[in-house]
Structures are given as C-alpha cells and as structure tokens.
Amino acid sequence: MNIKGIIQKNFKYFFFFFSYLRFKIFVLILLSLLVGLLDGFGLALFIPLFQVAVDDSSSQSNPELGQMDFLLDFMNSIGFSLSISNILLFMTILFISKGVFKFWDSYYKVSLQIFFVKKLRFQMLRGLENVSYQNFVGMDAGRIQNTLSAEVYKVTASFISYFNTLQYAVLLVVYMGLAFFSNWQFAILVSIGGFISNLFFKMLFRRTEAASISISNKGHHFQSFLIQAVQHFKYLKATSYFRRYKRKLIDQIDEIENLQQRIGLYNSLLNGLREPIVLVIVILVILIQVNLLGGALASILLSLMFFYRALNYVISVQSSWQTFISQFGGIVSSTEIIELFEKGEEEIKGSSDFGKLDSIVLTDVAFGFQDGAEILSNIDLTINKNETIAFVGPSGSGKTTLVNLIVGLFDQVGGEIHVNGLSRSSVNMLELRSRVGYITQEPVIFNDSIFNNVTFWAEKSPTNLAQFWKAIEMANLVEFVNELPEGEEMILGDNGVKASGGQKQRISIARELYKEVEIIVFDEATSALDSDSEKIIQENINSLQGKYTIILIAHRLSTIKNVDKIYLIDKGRIKSSGDFEQLFSSDVNFRRMVQLQEF
Ligand SMILES: Nc1ncnc2c1ncn2[C@@H]1O[C@H](COP(=O)(O)OP(=O)(O)OP(=O)(O)O)[C@@H](O)[C@H]1O
C-alpha cells in the first residue's frame, strides 16, 4: 500500500468529517491544544509552589522546574517574583484562561455538530426529493425509512464521540509532550507500554465496528418488515397471519440484540481492563525509572503528574473511540443513502415556459425498467386539452405505467413524447407535474385536518378559505364537512382512518381542485365502493369533464360511458381505441368485458 493509501485508510474518518467541516476542524484542534497547554503550565507550577512552601524563607528560595524553567523565567521577566502569592496568582490566571478556552472549545464543538447534522439531514431530504420516481420504485423503502429516522440519530452520537476522541487525543499529545519534556526516559517507557496495550484495544475496536455496521443493515431489514406490519395490519389481523409474521420480526430482533450484546461485551472488557492495564504499565515504568535509571525527583514527579493526566486521556480516547465505532454504522448508512439518491437523481431540464397544456402526444413510445422486459410498446396516442380519455385493460396490462409516462414520472426508452408540440426533453417536468392532479387507488390522506389536507398546509386566510370551500363544494363534500363537530378542522387520523373510502377519495379530489391543476388522473380504485359513493364519484367525474383534461385508469366500465376516447390496453400495447359505442360494436374483447360487468 502506498503512503497515500495508508493515510487514507487511517484517516478515513477524519477525511469524512473534513469533507463537511473543512478547516473548522483545525480551529477545534487548536482550541483543545490551548486548553491543554494552559492546564499543563498551571499544573507545572505546583512543583515550584511546593518548593517555595517547604522552604520557609519563601521569596529567597530559588525553585527549579528542569526543562520547564522557562515558565519561572517568564514570570520573572514580567516582574513577578517567585512568592507563594505570585505563583498562586499566576496559576489562577492560567486556569481562568483555560476555562475561557474550554468554554469556547465546547461551544464551538456543539455549533459544528449542529452544522454537520443539519447539513447531512438536509442533504438526505434533498436527495429524496430529487430522486426520480422511476429509480425510487427500485429502492428498498425500509432502508430509506430506517436511515432517515433511526440511523440519522446515530450520526449525532458518532459526531460527538469522534470529536471527543480527537480532542482527548490532542490533550493526550499535549500532556505526553509535557511529560516528555520533563523526563524523556520516563515518557518513552510509558509510551512503549501504551503502544502494546493499544494492540489489544484495536482488536476490540475492529470487532465493534463490524458489529455496528451489521446492526445498521439488519435494522433496515427489520424496519421494512415493521412498516409492512403496520401497513397491512388489518389483513394480518383478519387472517390471523400476524402470529406467523411476528416470528419473522422476532428473529430479526433476536439477531440485532445478539449483536448489541456482543458490542456490550467488548465495551465491558474495555471498561474492566483499561485501568488495570494502565496501572500495571505505570508501576512497571516507575520501578524501572527509580531502580535502574535514577533521575531528578522534581522532573520525575512532574513527568508523572503529566502522565497521570495523559493516562486519563488514554482512557477517554479509548472509550470515546469505542462509542464512535459503535455508532459509526449510522454514518455509513447515511452516506450510502445519499450516494444512492444521488445516483438515482432525476435530471430536471428544459423550459417551464410552455404555456397552458394544450396537447400531449405519444409517438411509437416504448418503456421498460432497467434490465427488465419491455412493459409498453408501440404506443401512439394524443391527449388534447379538456378531453377525457380512459385506459382499460386487464390487470398488469400497463395502464398505470402508461399514465406514469404521460405525467413525466417515467422516461420512455423508445419513441417520442411531445408536450404542446415541444419534445419532452425541452419541457421542465417539475413544472408539468405541478399542473397534474393525481387521485390514486388508495387516496393519499395525511394525518391532519381536512383544511390542511385539501390546501396542503396553506395559511388560513380569507382568500384561501374561500378557495377551500369552492374545492369542497366541487368535490361534493359540503354536507360531510358541515356535519362534523370540528368542521374543516377535523383531524383525519393515520391514512384517514376516520373517513370512509368514498370520503377519502373526495377529499383527495378536493385537494387537486384546490391546487388548480390542468390534468387530473383518476387511478380508479379496484376495490368496490358502495353504490352511493360510486354514483357520487361518477357524478364528480362527469362534472369535471370538459373543464379539465382527465385521464381515467378505469376498472369499472360504467365510469367511462361518456368519455371522449377509450384505449384498450393489452400486454403493453394499445389493442383498439374509440368512444364507448365504437369500441362496443367493433371490439369483441371490450364487448365481453362490458357484458361481464353487466350493464
Ligand atoms: N417497479 C416495477 N419493476 C418492474 N416491473 C414492474 C414494476 N411496476 C410494474 N411492473 C410491471 O409492469 C407491468 C404493468 O404494470 P401496471 O401497474 O402498469 O399495470 P396496470 O395495468 O396498471 O395493472 P392494474 O390494473 O392491476 O393496476 C406489470 O406486468 C408489472 O408487473
């Protein structure tokens, strides 16, 4: 491995944080350095303080500090004679300055932490926003959810522990330096002992790191299963499948907790062994120093004092590093998800200035997912302003995929799509989609008030309120809202559990009408609505017809009797098209479908 490789391997975490914080990291290191030096100088003055105190004729005594004599020289040079009170005064100044820098250092670290965590979280959200739907459908939803909710909190913890480690390491270096300065033989011997003990700790760190990453990965999987348990709760409950499903969850909890236990074991080993190891090293070194090497008592004492401080930081460095490693899985997951989002990012280009939607024309369009079979082929169709068209066809024939192409959620792999006569690549898809209303099979309801659901959290101004009631009226919801004790402030609950299927659909229609869209897509619910709701929705579609461009993905053929054009889709191709009567008389498959639905 070349030198660059070695540096990158050993400083990979440093480079990671550096890529976010840049030179701010060095300010933090500098502050820690100052704290350490001021503390060290303050401590060093204890030796002359004792010497002066033991020697009764204080001001006449001539205390010595060996290599650290420069401190006493400095005091003398600025006019402080070496009396007890002067040394104490000087020590006070040093420790107060240390306190000031320590405060600054601590506060600066918190500010950096907030800056870093915000940057990372914003980056994730931006990534999620910009990822194309086409790429999103191929991603692991559990992993995304877990990273954005649970893993991101580990990032804060790992940031704190990393910078604690870095600061402790700086302090360790400062005290080691001072100890070395005071008595280098003593320093070298302790360093050798420290180095040997570190080999053992390193092994524990490596194992902790592997377990931490494994926990994050298993966490994604678990989260994915858990979300599905909540989503499909009714089904699991109604079929008594919950018990079997729970087994899968329990197995995963077991695996995760076993790994946690292993991390706990490494932590406990570290906690239990650290002090005895350190103590044995110090005792051995003192024995060697005193019995074999001999040395000035003052300098050994001073060196020991610095070493005592340094050893504390050895312990702190090790334990905060252990914490960092055990939380590092969070950073790995977060950066991986950011990379994944970046790879799947949608390229938004083209002009937003293409006027009101006049026409969307598909010519010989084909679509398929990456590495998959072609799902749609040879699609030719034209959608004109304020027309209502419908796609019908068997399940899996490609109706939803076709609509996803039309509204710009998917990119075609062959053929051409023109919007207002402009090639789709020159039309801004964000702008196009902002003019699309989408009524999905499972209506999208947020756990908030009806007002917020419809207006998408608009301010409750008189204008917005008037527009809200207009949308409510058009979606046939006036009676429903007026009868609620809380009116438009009624909270709809998770997934809108407090409203019926028909009401939820009408609320989502109202949201699109409030938005003042130009195209409305109705992905008709395959599930049966009660006949009243169905009738109302039918009436709603009828009342919107001619005012908006409407695309219906129809499962109930009764809803498409009056549409302008029906496209019969089969196995990804348009089999035939025309209005209801034309298709009924010309297409035997269509006729059979209508007859099957008995109307
Ligand atoms: N994310 C995906 N990856 C790969 N294939 C997919 C994906 N989504 C859908 N498909 C496939 O594309 C085909 C068309 O699916 P699509 O959802 O468009 O059908 P549909 O006509 O709308 O069906 P339904 O009426 O049941 O909703 C299906 O064969 C389906 O398996």
Image (cartoon, rainbow, N blue to C red):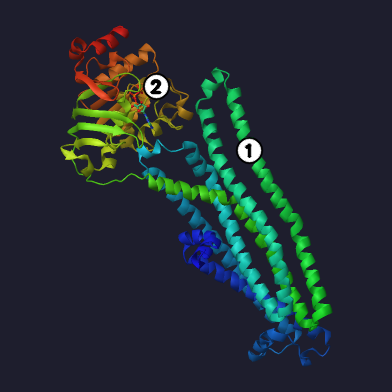
Amino acid at circle 2 = Gln
Q: Is residue 372 left or right of residue 518?
A: right
**Element on which disc 2 rests:** helix
Give above or below for 452 relative to 286: above
Task: Please state which of residues 119 and 294 is positioned toward the viewer in this rendering.
Answer: 294
Q: Quadrant of residue 78?
A: bottom right
Question: Which residue, as the protein is rendered here, is positioned at the far front?
Answer: 1
Question: What is the three-letter code of the residue carrying label 1?
Answer: Glu
Q: Is residue 199 visible?
A: yes
Badge 2: residue crowd in 10 Å (few <14, some 14–19, many ≥20): some
Q: Is residue 458 visible?
A: no
Relative to 91, does residue 389 appear above or below in the rendering?
above
Q: Nearer the viewer, residue 537 or 599?
A: 599
For residue 503, which numbered disc appears in the image?
2
* Residue linked to disc 1: 255
Q: Quadrant of ligand 1?
A: top left
Q: How many marks?
A: 2
Residue 581: horizontal and vertical position, in percent?
A: 19, 12
Residue closest to the eye, 199 or 463: 199
Is tag 1's residue or tag 2's residue first in the polypeptide sequence? 1
Direction left: furthest residue: 421
Residue at 19% x, 17% y: name it.
579
